[in-house]
Amino acid sequence: MADPWNRGHGAVDDMLDAENRLMADNLASKVSRLKSLAYDIDKEAEEQNSYLDGMDSNFLSATGLLTGSVKRFSTMVRSGRDNRKILCYVSAGLVVAFFLLYYLASRIQN
C-alpha cells in the first residue's frame, strides 16, 4: 500500500537532489580553487622567507666588513701625524674623483 502523503513528491525530490548535486559540485570547485590558492600562498611565503634569510646573511657580512673598516680607520687616525696627512690627501682625492666622475656622467647623459 502506497503512502497517501507522498503523492506527486517524486519529481520535487528529484529536482531537489539535482539542485543539491549542482551546489555540491560548485562547492567542490570552490574548495579546490581555495586549496590551490593556499598552496600558492604557502609556496610564495617559503620563497620570501628564503629571500629574507639571504638578505640577513648579506647584511651580517656587510656589517662585519664595515666594522673592520671602521677599526682600521680608527687605528690610522690614532696613529702619527704623517698618517693623518696621507689620510687627508686620500680623502681629498676621493672627493675630487667623485665630483669628476659626476661631471663626466652628467656630460655623457646630455
Image (tube, rainbow, N blue to C red):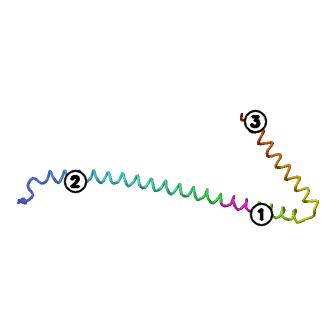
Query: Pointer 2: residues within 10 angstroms few (<14), some, or many (20+)?
Result: few
| Dot 2 or dot 1, earlier in sequence | 2
Left or right: where does residue 107 sit relative to residue 20?
Answer: right
The disc labelled 2 sits on which kind of residue?
Asp
Report the residue marked by disc 3: 107
Residue 45 on image: x %, y %: 54, 57
Quadrant placement of the C terminus: top right
Gap in angstroms between the C-alphas marked 2 and 3: 78 Å
Left or right: where does residue 52 sit relative to residue 86?
Answer: left
Gap in angstroms between the C-alphas marked 2 and 1: 74 Å
Viewer-side residue, 3 vs 34? 34
Residue 72 picture quarter:
bottom right
Residue 20 picture quarter:
bottom left
The disc labelled 1 sits on which kind of residue?
Thr
Residue 34 on image: x %, y %: 41, 54
Viewer-side residue, 3 vs 21? 21
The disc labelled 3 sits on which kind of residue?
Arg
Please state which of the two labelled residues, at mark 2 or mark 3, is closer to the viewer. 3
Query: Pointer 3: residues within 10 angstroms few (<14), some, or many (20+)?
Result: few
Please tell me whether mark 3 sits on a helix, a strand or a loop.
Answer: helix
Q: Is residue 27 above or below residue 60?
A: above
Query: Which residues lie in the magenta part?
Result: 56-64
Report the residue marked by disc 1: 67
Q: Is residue 58 magenta?
A: yes
Quadrant placement of the N terminus: bottom left
Report the residue marked by disc 2: 17
Please state which of the two labelled residues, at mark 2 or mark 1, is closer to the viewer. 1
Please tell me whether mark 2 sits on a helix, a strand or a loop.
Answer: helix
Residue 6 picture quarter:
bottom left
